[in-house]
Structures are given as C-alpha cells and as structure tokens.
Image (cartoon, grey):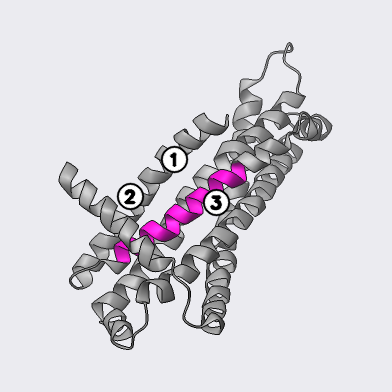
Amino acid sequence: MIRKFIETFGEYFMFLGKVFTKPGKWKVFSRKLIYEMDAMGIGSLLIVSIVSITLGSVITMQTAMQIESNWIPKWCVGYIVKTSAVMELCPTIISLLLVGNLGSRITAEIGSMRVTEQIDALEVMGINPASYLVLPKIVAAVIMIPLLIIVSIFFALSGGYVTVLLTGSVSTYDFVDGMTSFFRMYDIFYALTKTFIFAFVISSVSSFYGYRIDGGALELGEASTKGIVVASFVILILNMVVTQIML
C-alpha cells in the first residue's frame, strides 16, 4: 500500500511537470481559459449561493440559540457568524462542495477523452495533451474558485441577516454591529490563501485521475470517485496544515 502511494505520488508530480509547460498557441490557450472560467464560475454560482445562504442561516440560528445568557452581549451572534463564515465555513465547506461539482466534471471530461483515444490523437499530432487540456482548467480554477468563495461569504452573511430579520432572535442592529466589529483583513487573506491552495488541489487531482485512466466506462466511474475522495482528503489535511501555519 505504501509502495502504491509513493508511485501515485510520483506520477502526480510527473504529471504536473507535463502540465506546466509553455502553451503551444496562446490564442488557443486564452480561448480555452475563458471557456473554463465561464463553466467553473458562472456554472457553479447558483449552487454556491444556495448552499452559502443555508449555511449562514443555520449558523445564525444555532449561535443565537446557544447564546441565551444576559451576560453575553447580543452582538456576539453577528461576530461569531462572520468569523465562522469567513475563516472556515465558506473556504472549506464550499471547496468540498466544488470537489463534487467541478472535480467530477473535470475527471469525467478528461477521462472520456482518454477512453475515446482523443488524448492519443493529440500526442500523435505533436501536441502536449497535459498542458493543452489541463493547464487552462487549473488556471481557471485558481482564478474563479476564490471569487466564488468571496461571493459565498457575502451570501452567507446575507443569509444570516435575513434569518435575524425574520426570526427576531437578536436585533438587526446588534447583528450588524457584531459583523462589523473587530474586523481583521488578515482573516480575508487567510481564507483566500486556503482557497487558492484548495482550488489547485481540486483541479490538478481531478485532472490527474482523469488523465491516467486505463480502460473503459467502468474505470471512468472509478476514477471519478477516487478523484473526489482523494481531493477531499487532501483538502482536509491541508486545511489543518495551513491553519496551524497561519494562525
């Protein structure tokens, strides 16, 4: 098992070496990059917004329910919701959501090209298929996923505000006061740093498992599952590592 892990680990970095080469034609690369940015960003906006609003609403209700003591100021609800959404819920939970949404699509797309021998055809034509197919996806993910996380934070806080407005668990003034209190720009930097790393993991790991498929439709399904599981596991491990380093 350890030997297989080391071999896969080495294959992954050899794969990245093929990916990060100069594109043959910048015009083709830019066109594919724009397409991937649209597919990843606009295509994921709806699900990210819905999940973020739900997260913000739930964490607001749970926090307000727990803080019932008169000794604790009510603005703490807004502060806790803001801190939770910015530092952990949106960067990590939404990234795990995108593993299933974007990662499975990337693995299936590249894997189907491998199964139908389209990647072999690119190699015959003298084109580096790893760079041609994967590099635009990685660059697009590193650009769009942090933007999605920023949108996610906005919708999470908005969901919390609407929940307070509808339930009256705390006053809207106290909630907004808590959200705007003790703001640190470093928290945003920390969240976006994690997100950049997670975006690279999602795109590169998913592409790797799609690129190395050897077989047919059955192997394609297995590769998609492995890509999601491995990317999710790596994100959780890196989340602990980055948090330990930065905080």
The residue depicted at 66 percent of the width and 54 percent of the height is 151
Task: State the separation of the CA atoms marked 1 and 3.
Answer: 12 Å
- Asked if residue 73 shows in the view, the reply is yes
> Mark 3 or 2 closer to N-term?
3
Residue at the far top in the pictured view: 71
| Amino acid found under the numbered disc labelled 3 | Phe
Could you tell me if the residues under marks 3 and 2 are in contact, i.e. CB atoms within 8 Å? no
- Asked if residue 181 is positioned above or below residue 135 in the image, the reply reads above
Residue that carries the numbered disc 1 in the rendered image: 238
Q: Residue furthest bottom?
A: 125
Q: Picture quarter containing residue 74?
A: top right
Q: Quadrant of the C terminus?
A: top right
Secondary element type, mark 2: helix
Q: Which amino acid is tagged 2?
A: Val
**Looking at the picture, how far across and down is residue 222, in whole percent?**
24, 60
The amino acid marked with disc number 1 is Leu
Q: Which residue is mark 3?
A: 196
| Disc 3 packing (10 Å; few <14; some 14–19; many ≥20) | some
